[in-house]
Amino acid sequence: MPADERLNRTILPIPEPKYVGLTTYDAKDPDTRYPPIKALRPPKQAPNVVIFLVDDAGFGSSSVFGGPCHTPNFEKLAGGGLKYIRFHTTALCSPTRQALLTGRNHHSVGMGAITEMGTSAPGNSGVRPKDKAPLAEILKLNGFSTAQFGKCHEVPYWEVSPMGPFTQWPTGSGFEHFYGFVGGEANQYYPGLYEGTTAVEPPRTPEEGYTLNEDLADRAITWIRQQKVLMPDKPFFVYYAPGATHAPHHVPKEWSDKYKGKFDGGWDKLREETFARQKKLGVIGKDAELTKRHEEIPAWDEMPAELKPVLTRQMEIYAGFMEQTDHEIGRVIDAINDLGVMDDTLIYLIIGDNGASAEGTINGCFNEMCTLNGMPGIETPEFLLSKIDDFGTPKAYNHYAVGWAHALCAPYQWTKQIASHWGGTRNGTIVHWPRVIKAKGETRDQFHHVIDVAKTVLEVCGLPEPTIVNSIAQAPLEGASMVSTFTNPKADENHTVQYFEMMGNRGIYHKGWTACTRHRTPWKADAPPPFDDDVWELYGPDDWTQSNNIAAKEPKKLADLQRLWLIEATKYNVVPLDDRGFERINPDIAGRPQIITGDSQLLFPGMRVSEACILTLKNKSYAVTAQITVPAAGAEGVIITQGGDAGGWSLYFKGGKLKYCFNFFGIEHYIVGADTAIAAGEHQVRMEFKYDGGGLAKGGDVALFYDGKQVGKGRVEKTEPMGYSSDEACDVGGDTGSPASPEYGATGNKFTGKIEWVQIDLKGDDHDHLVTAEDRLKVAMARQ
């Protein structure tokens, strides 16, 4: 037996062998013998492993599963492998990703919802238990090279600062290399990027043709080539998770213009066309029925005629976005093929971490932050129409209407977030591995779930589930292997029971039967009913699309499945059920740590931190003070900014004068400037915002000061109540993302002088408008 096969791989790191034998005095002694050091490698049969995970894509989006978005590279990959047509996710981002990366159910690894909604309950904490090591860690400790590219939305919200801890960042979770973003979504033109745990800026600007999709592919290709050149005998594990096709839907016009006029018939017609293609392709059952559109989703014919050009443009942009994503993933696949290692590479392509997103409201939006702030009404049909040419560009932060999301989940009911129905959880998946999978373009209809991937990867690599990882005894994986289906289309179904739950939406699968209840609708802000008032539905094994509810005919079967759901929910930490909204966002109520507390915060030049790392300034009065040195040539550039083009604020110099801009969702910009330019030398500059009060999103008075003397005043009529941005940073000394003020550009906006410090205060006026050295020390010490 080869030496590497005799290693005890159930304990990781693998225990080092200890040499026992003659120890000589002189290395030149002929009796000096030590076994040679061998580089750690996996078992010989282990292939390279690549997992592609597309974001926010419904089952009926990609052409490979009958959708309208042209994805030739996905089709080519499926043509050389297998299409899994009953593969499932959790209905939401962070939970699916943590389940995929650990091989355990999402509540079992603390990810009952997105990280921003973590609570103190074990199933919703956002904290991965130490006894459930991720797949990347297992593979790395068995001798794989590991890298992640793209989205990471598994870091606890209080650990996203530059100070970490980084144990749940990619490089703390088994990936030796990470290039991507940490959070739920990314601006495709101005992403907040990290390399490892260090913030980095994109290599180009949008004007120079930059998009995140292309950048991620470039970086992945470079890493894969380098790995194979330097260590050709060492397999790699690559997890590639683009921000696409999550909102904002950003794509250059050459992609979206391909779809001009193709969606003028509307979303109801699109569903019917997609259903017909799916039947022809054989990616749904022969007797499958197209489910009905629910009353909460308007018919295309009910939409205002004047809005329809905007609505169709939204879908054209999304389709172009998906096609660009297919193109960039295709480039990575081609690079693997060019290296001559395709036959020995297991590829998973999961088209969606959940169903298509219905978070864009009934009309869709030009700036998604309006919706996320609970203010969709400010984007009137007239406003949307006036912005039609800017959709998809760096000027927009757009999302499509609910009707399109529903159409892209065809033929199933509902969408993302709704874990009760297949529209939220069924995602087309492709598996490609030429050395083993000889079938070309066949489908597999066995039931599978995202937790099955890790189990499958370990089996094909000849690796056992470890019993101990990093000195921690491990809980078993919770998925079922898919390996038998690789060579046998009629293999027995071995994943026979699976619960689903997301914010109260619940479902259970057992041997073909499904029982489910929808508790709440994503785009509605109304309070959900008590859990015991939810109405359960029942669907039989012959009902491919959950189209015929037979709960009234089979009450005993429904009761059995409801009881089974409760058993599974108890087993995997799903209870207590939690459908709260605001309470889960508020850390004081939710019971999770906060990065920033108190009423003062000190910042220094060069800092770039997420919104979670800054005192909350919404709906209250605050002041921003900076100690600066102005050069002889005068002051220009940004002192501090938060947010970007989609909303936020900035304190900066323009033409030597201090200015403050409040950017209200990119719709209105309230700019207040000093009356005079500032002289060269050392100064303390300050901005004070006095909130009007009387509710959320009100305005306030702005005052500007040089060295305690007021030099300007003005008004902000409206403010953003909940969040400035989903992905833009707070920067000191420049604006690294999209510009928060229209008075400077995305580049060349760094402050020309020197910044000693910047302080944000929520305290009352200190009368002389100066911050003393003693105050600064107190703030700094409070942060220790």
Image (cartoon, rainbow, N blue to C red):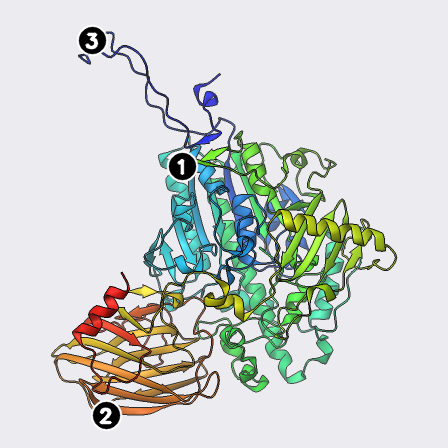
Write the residue at 79% across / 53% down: 559
Residue 403, x across and y down, in percent: 67, 71
Q: Residues within 10 Å of mark 1 (few under 14, many from 20)?
A: some
Tag 2 and tag 3, C-beta contact below 8 Å: no
Residue 444 vs 362, above or below: the answer is above
- Which is more N-terminal, label 1 or label 2? 1
Query: For residue 646, what is the image quadrant?
Result: bottom left
Q: Residues within 10 Å of mark 3 (few under 14, many from 20)?
A: few
Give the amino acid type for the residue marked by disc 3 in the picture.
Asp
Residue 90, x across and y down, in percent: 61, 54
Write the residue at 77% across / 57% down: 546
Residue 29 has which mark? 3
Q: Residues within 10 Å of mark 2 (few under 14, many from 20)?
A: some
Write the residue at 27% across / 65% down: 782
Write the residue at 59% across / 78% down: 310
- Which is more N-terminal, label 3 or label 2? 3
Tag 1 and tag 3, C-beta contact below 8 Å: no
**Front-lying residue, 577 or 52:** 577
Residue 228 has which mark? 1
Q: Quadrant of the C terminus?
A: bottom left
Residue 121 vs 133, above or below: the answer is below
Q: Secondary structure at mark 2?
A: loop
Tag 2 and tag 1, C-beta contact below 8 Å: no
Q: Secondary structure at mark 1?
A: helix
